[in-house]
Amino acid sequence: MTTKSVGQSTPRVDAYDKVIGTAQFTDDLQFGPALLYGRVLRSPHPHALIKRVDATKALALPGVKAVVTGDDTPGTIGLYLKDRHIFCRDRVRYVGDPVAGVVATSEEIAEQACQLIEVEYEELPAVLDPLAAMQPDAPLLHPELGQYEVVPFILPQPGTNISNLFKVRKGDVEATWPQCNAVVEATYRVPHIQHTPLEPHVAVARWDPSGEVTLWSSTQSPFAQRDLIAQSLGISQGNMRVIGTYVGGGFGSKAGVSMEALAVVMAKKVPGRPVKVRMTREEEFFCTFVRQGLVAKVKIGGNQAGKILALQVEYYWDAGAYTEYGVNITRASGYSSTGPYVIPNVHTDSYCLYTNHPVGGPMRGFGMPEIHWSIEQSVDRLAEALGVDKVQFRLSNCVRGGDEIVTGMIMHPTGMSQCIRKAADAIDWDQREPPSASHKRRGKGFAACWKAPAMPPDASSEAWIRFNEDGSVSVGVSGQELGQGVHTVATQMAAEALGVPVNWVHIAYPIDTRYSPYEWQTVASRITWSMGNAIRAAAQDARQQIFATVGQYWRENPQDLDIVDGEIVSYRSKRSIPLQQVSINGLTLPDGTWVGGPVLGRGSFMPSYVTDLDAETGQGKRAVVHYTVGCQAVDLEVDPATGQIEILKLVAVYDVGKAINPEQVQAQMEGGVVQGLSSALLEELQLEDGRPGNACLMDYRIATAVDTPRQIVGHIVEVPQDDGPWGARGIGEHPMIATAPAIANALYDALGVQFNDMPLTGEKVYLALEEREG
Amino acid sequence: MSTHTITITVNGSAESHTVPAHMTLLDMLRDTLGLTGTKNGCSAGECGACTVLLNGEPVNSCMVLAVEADGAEVFTVEGLAGMGRQGDKGTRGQGHQETLHPLQQAFIDEGAVQCGFCTPGMLISAYALLQRNPTPNEDDIRAALLGNLCRCTGYTRIVQAIQKTAQTAGHETHSTKQEAGSKKEGGR
């Protein structure tokens, strides 16, 4: 199929506003002199009972308008498992848990008033490690676990710290181990890291005396926020309005509800006045979401023919104090626990564990970077133990269209093996170049990956298309622009589906849940695919309306009509008429009457084919909508004298089905691998007794322009997705998944030392070499 | 809380304002002057999103008090594009009104913008670099951006955009001076 707009590297439609400084982010919105500010008093303890809260002195401070506490938030909140109060009521569960909020005329006064609130705590023993959380005598964080409202596919274990357990039982691993020629086993650890978007979280809320509530927030999830906050506060979703403008980076940290509900609760106390709550960079590190920690125990075996025969994994997720998304990350890591390989015998236990750590949330990759850290190193070591080339080993075992995968689902057409071959070529896998100095070591590493959108089976998208008097097009979508380029691809897809030039299309923005079409959330790399399908449907609907009108006007069969470059044409009569004559105004018929009128195309998309999985075996017909696959290869050099790693070249190859905008796919690959590299080499949120030790950008380093490799090479593979618009599937998260294990495997190639724990700091590498030398 | 009246030249326009003693230059730009193009990412001088030129030097405006800028010249992202000049209007496109600085155009052309929150600070740091070194190599560029964090792009395209701007400018000074009216389209 030839396309005009889809497949072109159209420049970003939001770039102009962003380079001149007029693109509005939430904190840029102006609210006038009525604006008040909120600050939050947070728990200093990882685990304690709240015995008493006294705000008398705070309320007496001039400029203070209101104080809120857990007494104001009786309802629970949560996306999959409602395990949290917006403000803590009787118990705090992590350092940073919100205990009280102050509304005042300035941030300074609000902060000062927070310090005047007296809180009496009774400290409790804390759970600070996921394995400790599993112990039978571990302190319970949520004794009420059995009473929380939960969706059917999440299985909390009341009386324990396990908020979800996902199991795979496929084949018979125990009977298979003796048939293996080699078995490797290791335990891997991934620390908490933080998303670190450049824009901190910010929310402004206004609770009108009429009961109408408006929330302006920097969010990936305007509709989910509307729904969850309305449910928790016992108001109608119809009275709750969320407005979302540009988001200054999300990476999952701005998905669902983290801090936004705090502003709403505070605003309720000062009816009619907007209340702004901004997270400081320090709060950003431990009071919104962090990436979950993981302890992964992996045992994998294969035979001399180069086939993987059995895999046993236990994932212990350090999900923190509450589980907005953690329970589903646990599930996703279970149903994807083999990585992109076909393994006949699988035994997986994936546990989501409460700890007194910051709240674990979704982060780019949704558990996949963490589990692939263990899978891809294990696969590498197994190949070595079997004496098989690591690329060949992956080719022999990787998933192909028609294969039965870990959950029993039959894999759709996929370009996994093409990705592996392209990456091997791009890194010159069979060549090993010498290091730049004789004392240095050089190595190459490889890692493959897969990831499916992890979401409720019926997560949906809606779109509308309207026309302006000049024929230009307004497209309503609620895929949020986080920087990934959703507006640009939406523009391209709408232009393509309608048959108009791409520069006729405007995106209706910002997202306003009162007027914008429904979108579950901008997460899971699902937007290009799901929203794209909705746009296509809306365009189809608009075209049918237009063709009915013009068909009547020309007395032709609507099926003979098309729209080409903004002209409505008839293939039968060769007539044409500009779109602008039909889009709003009517056409006069010979008898003087009129046909037509404003066209409003509407479309929606909901996948109908995802099925439940058996709770005991994890087996089912179709676990997910699809998998995006890819792989990465690394060429690096390490200086044994310092342990410092220099990435010389990084290759990323992904099968996106169809690149709607190839340059934007490249840009996602570049940005994703650098975020992956940053996590692999630099990042760890240090927690001592649950207290963050490096909650600032000076101490928590992310990759700078100096840390990033000069050579990042991206290649696109396109094996079309049957349920995707023009064959497209998502790419936003995937480039982060394979980076860290590819680096670890290259380091192993260079040094012969395996590093089980992320990150690969110079210190860690140096000490490991010292230990080896004895 | 004491206040002070200061005079400050922002993007070429001198203005007097009365500001609290503890107000930062960043807050003054954003909240008093409404110049919200300059962003606040950390309030601690660690992310570079608030970079502006203070008397020609790039600074983190969150680390400068407004009163310290009394009598100074401040240059922000809003000053980069020539205000009010008419650009191309597409037939049905967004009719961009401003002529862009070559760096801004290069950021668009090279795909150096994603979420856009670091972009204003990046542009100012890049502008300062090209002022002091019109022919930077890749190392120079990367070093100049050390104080500007970006979490989206991986920096590659930002570096390319600055390289391209420098190369184009170098070309133009060496060859016949091009006519002043740029033919570049505003953004698309």
Image (cartoon, coloured by chain):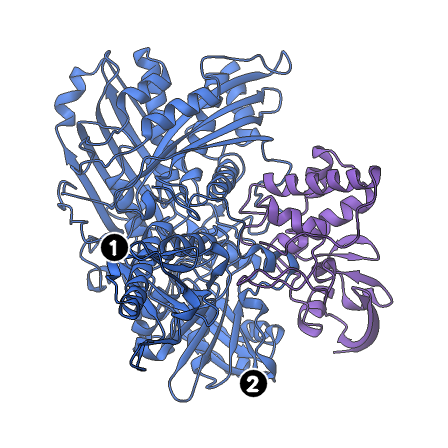
Chain colours: A blue, B purple
Pointer 1: what residue? A456
Q: Which residue is drawn at 51% across and 79% down?
A: A274
Provide residue B88's location: percent of width, then percent of height: 64, 59
The furthest residue to the bottom: A209
Would you call the spot at circle 2 few (<14 residues within 10 Å), some (14-19), or many (20 or more)? few
Question: Secondary structure under badge 2?
Answer: helix
- Three-letter residue code for mark 1: Pro
Q: Which residue is drawn at 69% across and 56% down?
A: B100
For the residues marked 2 and 1, what is the alpha-carbon distance in whole angstroms? Answer: 47 Å
- Three-letter residue code for mark 2: Ala
Q: In this view, does A92 lie above or below A35?
A: above
Q: Is residue A168 above or below residue A165?
A: above
Pointer 2: what residue? A60
Chain name for mark 1:
A
Provide residue A582's location: percent of width, then percent of height: 38, 70
Provide residue A464's location: percent of width, then percent of height: 35, 65
Q: In the image shown, does A198 or A562 lie closer to the viewer?
A: A562
Dot label at residue A737: none
| Residues at marks 2 and 1 on the same chain | yes
User: Is residue A255 left or right of A160 when viewed as pictured?
Assistant: right
Q: In this view, does A172 lie above or below A692?
A: above
Q: In this view, does A745 lie above or below A626?
A: above
Image quadrant in which the N terminus of chain A is located: top left
Provide residue A706's location: percent of width, then percent of height: 64, 36
Q: In the image shown, does A177 or A392 lie closer to the viewer?
A: A392
Q: Can you tell which quarter of the image residue A718 is in?
A: top left
Chain name for mark 2:
A
